[in-house]
Image (tube, helix red, strand yellow):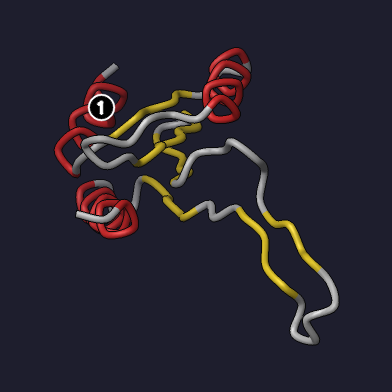
Amino acid sequence: MKERTIQNKILIALSKEYAGRSIWWTNDTGVAKSMDGKRTISFGLKGSPDILGCLGGRFIGIEVKTESGKQREAQAKFQKAFERAGGVYIIARSVEDALSAVRTIASA
């Protein structure tokens, strides 16, 4: 399954399970060409997780990976900074990974 497919399924599952008590959104990063093709535009914060959310006052970042996907160096650095700032960072390879981790946070 592609990373984007896993990401979309996680967003749907979290939005259903925590409806009315949380907010979740995609956090796309990358580069794109301007409409005239003359400029390159960077967007997002390098290394930041694919999904961001807030549940019970906790700021949560979820980095989505396929079964064989590996965390890049910029992502590992972002994870350390995010956790130092009090955020919760999750690496999820499936909907079940994400739900299990978020359920643990919700019950704490």
Residue at the image position 78 percent from the left and 66 percent from the top: 40
Q: Residues within 10 Å of mark 1 (few under 14, many from 20)?
A: some
Percent across and percent down for residue 75 are 54, 30
Percent across and percent down for residue 64 are 35, 41
Q: Decide if residue 63 is on the left or right side of residue 30.
A: left
- Spot the residue most to the right: 38
Which residue position holds label 1?
A: 101
- Spot the residue most to the bottom: 36
In the depicted structure, whether residue 10 falls above or below residue 12: above
Secondary structure beneath label 1: helix
Which of the two residues, 101 or 40, is positioned nearer the viewer here? 40
Q: How many marks?
A: 1
- Spot the residue most to the top: 84
Instruction: Kindly indicate the quadrant of the structure image that contains residue 36.
Output: bottom right
In the depicted structure, whether residue 27 falls above or below residue 102: below
| Amino acid under disc 1 | Ala
Residue at the image position 26 percent from the left and 59 percent from the top: 5
Percent across and percent down for residue 25 are 46, 54
Instruction: Kindly indicate the quadrant of the structure image that contains residue 1.
Output: bottom left
Q: Decide if residue 74 is on the left or right side of residue 100.
A: right
Q: Quadrant of the C terminus?
A: top left
Residue at the image position 26 percent from the left and 42 percent from the top: 66
Which of the two residues, 99 or 65, is positioned nearer the viewer here? 65
In the depicted structure, whether residue 83 falls above or below residue 78: above
Percent across and percent down for residue 17 are 20, 48
